[in-house]
Amino acid sequence: MQYLLALADGLSRHDDLQVSVFYEDSRSVPSGSATSPVAWVALPTGESRVTGAIRTASTILNTRTSSIGRFKALESHDLDCLISCASPVGFHLGIPFVGIVFDFIYRYFPDLADFPLKERVTRDLVNSRLVRHAALTVTDSEVGKSDLVRLFGADPGKTRPIPLSPPPHVYQHRSLSESTLREVALRYDLPERFIFYPAQLWGHKNHRRLFEALAHLRDWDGLRVPCVLAGSGGDHAEAVLSAVPELGLEGQVLHVGYVPDADLAAIYKLSSALVYASFAEYTNMPVLEAMVLETPVLCSNAFAMPEQVGDAGLLFDPFDVQDIATQIRRIWNDEALGETLVRRGTKRMEKLSLDHFGNRWRDVVVEVAALGESQ
């Protein structure tokens, strides 16, 4: 969803493009959309299972079908280019389309509870069809492009790595008053100093090793570093949070659950650092949010995250508890280091801004639209 908001905003900055977002869930529509240059269009609901099954079977067999159900509404919009994530519907519609592929984590960690067999098979099917039928495919990193080529035989010349950019609301919350920050700190009963990890409570987010690193600092260095977690619980919440009392971290680890965007920005700004511990993601949005909001960044060195962070953060091995602890100790005890990382983060965001993101996406859209005109 955050990616969609950034994409819509980035493309809408170009007067030569008319941008429409087709959605099924009204919760996807951001506030203020009525005055936005982006047209938010609801897709019809109530598609029959038979129609969906026919479309799925046709996708598997690499054949087009006119039985496209709710997506038939797209035909009336005379689209020059369709951008699609996890769906080759553009193939069935005969519209040149761009396929977005975010990651292939399920290929590296098939035993994670987040990726049951059905999920892995579905992702493989969708990714292979996107690569086969999309005019161009987009990944969020060079590492992602390399894996798409290696795992699915994508044509390197038809694959575009476009780095993530934070959604526009993050910039809107960049300057928060001291009174607002105090109100948020009181509302969530935040410690005076703390590190921050906003992430769903899923196994691959690696909360367990982060907790073990905090326990290590306490036991071996006598250093008590409070940690605030944000993010909804989900099915794995109980298992993830059970490590807190097990490691004696009650009162040191605070889970505040789901947090609205404005409050989330305030927590970033109040924290001493973001610590992003996931071992199973190519890139992530919190790192970019932290840089925009002038929060020092500590981040896992997995997959494309070093490519994303550059020199604007401290990296650690997400499987090495002592390495996580070492980087937390460095940022906790060295205020000058934190200030240096903030400056570097601000500089890095000049290259990862919404303008740059929108410009690169515009080039892709114009290229694909031109292919349609030449057919």
Image: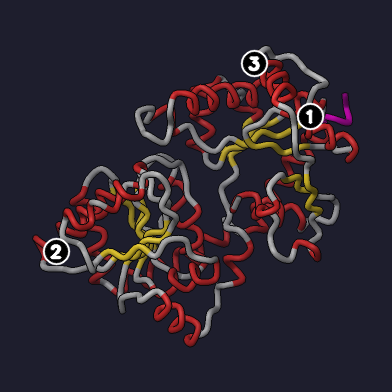
Q: Residues within 10 Å of mark 1 (few under 14, many from 20)?
A: some
Amino acid residing under circle 2: Arg
**Magenta-highlighted residues:** 371-375
Is 7 left or right of 374, judged from the image as shown? left
Q: Which mark is residue 69?
A: 1
Taking the spot 70% from the left edge, 34% from the top edge, the residue there is: 98
Q: Residue furthest top?
A: 61
Does residue 347 sit above or below 107 in this rendering?
below
Identify which residue, 28 or 216, lies in the foreground. Answer: 28
Residue at x-position 26% and y-position 49%: 208
Labels 2 and 1 touching (C-beta < 8 A): no
Q: Which residue is found at the position 90% from the left and 37% from the top? A: 76
Pick whichever of labels 2 and 3 is earlier in the sequence: 3
Q: Main secondary structure of the magenta part?
A: helix
Q: Amino acid at mark 3?
A: Ile
Quarter of the rendering containing residue 367 = top right
Q: Which tag is nearer the camera, tag 2 or tag 3?
A: 3
Q: Is residue 119 magenta?
A: no
Residue 106 location (% of width, % of height): 44, 30
Which mark identifies residue 218? Answer: 2
Identity, as a three-letter code, of the amino acid under mark 1 = Gly
Judge left or right: residue 125 versus residue 321: right
Tag 3: Cα neighbours inside 10 Å, few (<14), some, or many (≥20)? few
* SS state under label 1: helix
Element carrying mark 3: helix
- Residue 189 pos. (x, y %): 35, 76
Q: Nearer the viewer, residue 147 or 218?
A: 218
Do labels 3 and 1 touch, CB within 8 Å? no
The residue singled out by tag 3 in the image is 60
